[in-house]
Image (cartoon, rainbow, N blue to C red):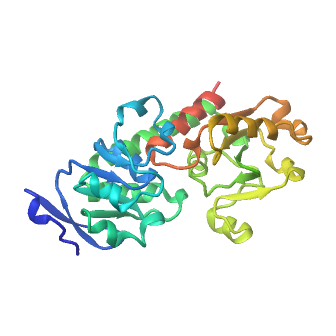
């Protein structure tokens, strides 16, 4: 158990998390989120952050400007976080399991049990319990379920006959996204089906292709990306101009124009919120489903 600075808290509690037990303040005022998932969880629970990665800050949409926290980068340094004098640090074991002890020397540190991005729902509830936000978490989950119920109702009979394909474009690589990816879980919760080329959970995907969420394909296999609707998301490009250039190059491939989904004009380019996040990004994905599928 870490008793870091408990003597400095006017009120505190002992919490259990995926790494162990930690003493944290009842009302933390200076929270640092080490990764984007922790950042989203803190924000949707209404906590004010003093530090977090600003990578992919566009995930926060039009509200991004109000989150005036210090950018600690994708790979935060101990020195940068120490300078912020946090009273609580949040991080996901996916990225920070090995450095947990070092973070705990700076401030009470709670590790979120996120191992794979497709498992984003379960750790959300767990960290809500740790932070005393159980009731709010129930409201957030209920809103998510209500919105998907409304989506399914408005889709009607089309829900069972619409196969949704997803393609991830990173520099020099095109991949099919399977059900194990963050938005793949949302599509499944929404009752949407996937093409046979992508209808694999994370375990099957990992066993077949060595990756739990995607299968890289050559341009000769672009037909595997066909469906009734195709969502394309780009990631890993230096800037938006390069991202747009990459998308344009994909769409000039000879087989691209032969896809049924292309010929029917059902290809939609979406943002990085389709790749990872918590219920904050999930609501943005649902916004897209209403925009592009419910007409």
Residue 44: quadrant of the picture: top left
**Front-most of 147 and 198?**
198
Is residue 229 visible in the rendered structure shown here? no
Give the percent coordinates (x, y) of residue 111.
Answer: 36, 64
**Front-most of 143 and 253?**
253
Q: Which image quarter holds the N terminus?
A: bottom left
At 69% from the left and 71% from the top, the residue drawn is 207
At 48% from the left and 32% from the top, the residue drawn is 61
At 84% from the left and 48% from the top, the residue drawn is 222
> Would you place residue 94 above or below residue 266 in this image?
below
- Left or right: residue 93 versus residue 149 is left
Give the percent coordinates (x, y) of residue 30.
Answer: 24, 49
As drawn, the residue found furthest toward the top would be: 295
> Would you place residue 15 above or below residue 27 in this image?
below
At 28% from the left and 68% from the top, the residue drawn is 104
**Front-most of 3 and 274?**
3
Residue 217: quadrant of the picture: bottom right
Give the percent coordinates (x, y) of residue 155.
Answer: 63, 33
> Would you place residue 58 above or below residue 141 in this image?
above
- Left or right: residue 188 versus residue 122 is right
- Left or right: residue 82 versus residue 26 is right
Give the percent coordinates (x, y) of residue 196.
Answer: 77, 54
- Left or right: residue 245 versus residue 65 is right
């Amino acid at each position: 158990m870490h008793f870091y600075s408990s003597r400095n808290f006017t009120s505190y509690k002992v919490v259990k998390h995926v790494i162990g037990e930690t003493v944290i303040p009842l009302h933390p005022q200076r929270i640092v989120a080490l990764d984007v998932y922790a950042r989203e969880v803190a924000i949707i629970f209404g906590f004010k952050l003093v530090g977090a990665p600003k990578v992919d800050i566009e995930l926060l949409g039009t509200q991004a400007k109000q989150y005036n926290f210090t950018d600690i980068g994708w790979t935060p340094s101990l020195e940068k976080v120490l300078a912020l004098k946090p009273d609580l640090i949040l991080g996901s074991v996916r990225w920070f399991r090995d450095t947990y002890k070092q973070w705990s020397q700076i401030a009470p540190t709670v590790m979120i049990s996120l191992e794979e991005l497709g498992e984003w729902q379960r750790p959300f509830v767990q960290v809500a319990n740790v932070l005393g936000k159980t009731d709010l978490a129930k409201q957030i989950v209920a809103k998510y379920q209500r919105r998907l119920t409304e989506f399914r109702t408005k889709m009607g009979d089309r829900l069972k006959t619409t196969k949704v394909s997803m393609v991830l474009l990173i520099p020099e690589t095109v991949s099919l996204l399977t059900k194990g990816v963050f938005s793949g879980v949302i599509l499944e919760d929404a009752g949407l089906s996937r093409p046979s080329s992508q209808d694999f959970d994370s375990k099957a995907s990992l066993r077949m292709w060595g990756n739990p969420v995607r299968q890289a394909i050559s341009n000769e296999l672009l037909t595997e990306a066909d469906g009734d609707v195709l969502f394309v998301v780009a990631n890993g490009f230096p800037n938006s101009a390069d991202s747009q250039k990459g998308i344009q190059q994909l769409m000039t491939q000879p087989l691209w124009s032969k896809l049924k989904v292309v010929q029917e004009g059902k290809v939609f380019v979406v943002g990085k919120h389709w790749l990872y996040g918590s219920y904050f990004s999930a609501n943005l994905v649902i916004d897209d489903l209403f925009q592009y599928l419910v007409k």
